[in-house]
Amino acid sequence: MFPSLENIAARLRLKQLRLLIELDNHGSLHKAAEEMAISQPGATKVLREIESILGMPLFDRQPKGLVPNDVGRCITRYARLIYSDLAHLREEVMGITQGEGGRLSVGVIMGAVPLLSRALSRLRQKQPTLSVEVVENTSASLLALLDEGRLDLAICRTGVSRRASAYQSVALGDEPLSVVATRNHPLAGAAHLEISELSHYRWIVYPVQMPMRQALERELSEAGLEVPRYPLETSSTFATMMLLQEDPTLVAVIPREVAEFAERFGVLVQLPVSLRALVEPFGAVSRAGTELSPAARLLLEELLSEC
């Protein structure tokens, strides 16, 4: 039986996790021991300790060395995450104690990327030693990362969660939408279009239950049209642009500011179809009852300066 979380937390040591990482890197107890500046018998003892704690072997002995089994690969992956988090902790604390720099991890939905880019540009001019990680994803995924403590701040919507009260949000703006295609699309030169005129074309859409998908389905329904059959589903901006380039008959709905950026560089064109903005504005979201880090507060100030 696998030990409880309390048992693992009480007995597991960082030195043991470090050994797993070095074993995965080198496939040899001897080389792992050298990397950690301990003896090979000492490394063997550490490995036995962690296998005893978990109640199962983590590596298979093969001619080419020690190879992690399925459980070993899983444990090692989390060992790397823990060490990565410790490195980020050290970086952030050093920034706080030195009065500058630090580290910031921020999540963002596609439609808010332009806003975040401008805010980060200004913030980095004021804090040039600040290290920033930007994670683009859907609101649901970003909220999950907030719950896990992987993000300091997320620019997204809380309405996609059944636990909206678990978050605090500062409204930042609406998200107008555009229908886009490539410059070679048959309707690219039209002066005005109704959404019904796109019914014969295939769509690239966001996954089911996502706000962008719901907005499109609402517009189609109100025009008396069916939901697109056999659509291409993706939440990736880059995938959407690449798919449109590969097939000039495809159309997609993306945030207007993203569409304007792509149009400015000749990547896409906006089709003259009128769409309403998403019902729920996006905001700067953090976990309820928690204080923002100094770097996150500075970023929020920059974001609000445009609102």
Image (tube, helix red, strand yellow):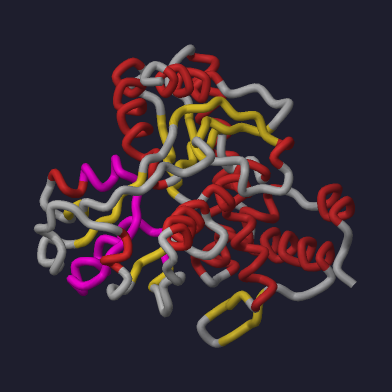
- The quadrant of the image that shows the C terminus is top left
Q: Residue furthest bottom?
A: 63
Q: Residue at the spot x=87%, y=63% of the render?
A: 3
Left or right relative to 123: residue 54: right
**26 or 273: which is nearer to us?**
273
- The quadrant of the image that shows the N terminus is bottom right
Left or right relative to 158: residue 240: left
Q: Which residues are magenta?
A: 234-261
Left or right relative to 255: residue 102: right
- Count the marks: 0
Q: Is residue 27 magenta?
A: no
Residue 48 percent coordinates (x, y) = 77, 66
Q: Is residue 37 visible?
A: no
Residue 229 percent coordinates (x, y) = 42, 78
Q: Residue furthest front?
A: 224
**166 or 175: which is nearer to us?**
175
**241 or 119: which is nearer to us?**
241
Q: Residue at the spot x=46%, y=58% of the render?
A: 222
Residue 230 vertical position relative to residue 123 in the rendered view, above or below:
below
Residue 228 vertical position relative to residue 164 in the rendered view, above or below:
below
Residue 25 percent coordinates (x, y) = 50, 64
**39 or 140: which is nearer to us?**
140
Q: Is residue 91 visible?
A: yes
Q: Residue at the spot x=59%, y=43% of the render?
A: 150
Residue 143 percent coordinates (x, y) = 61, 45
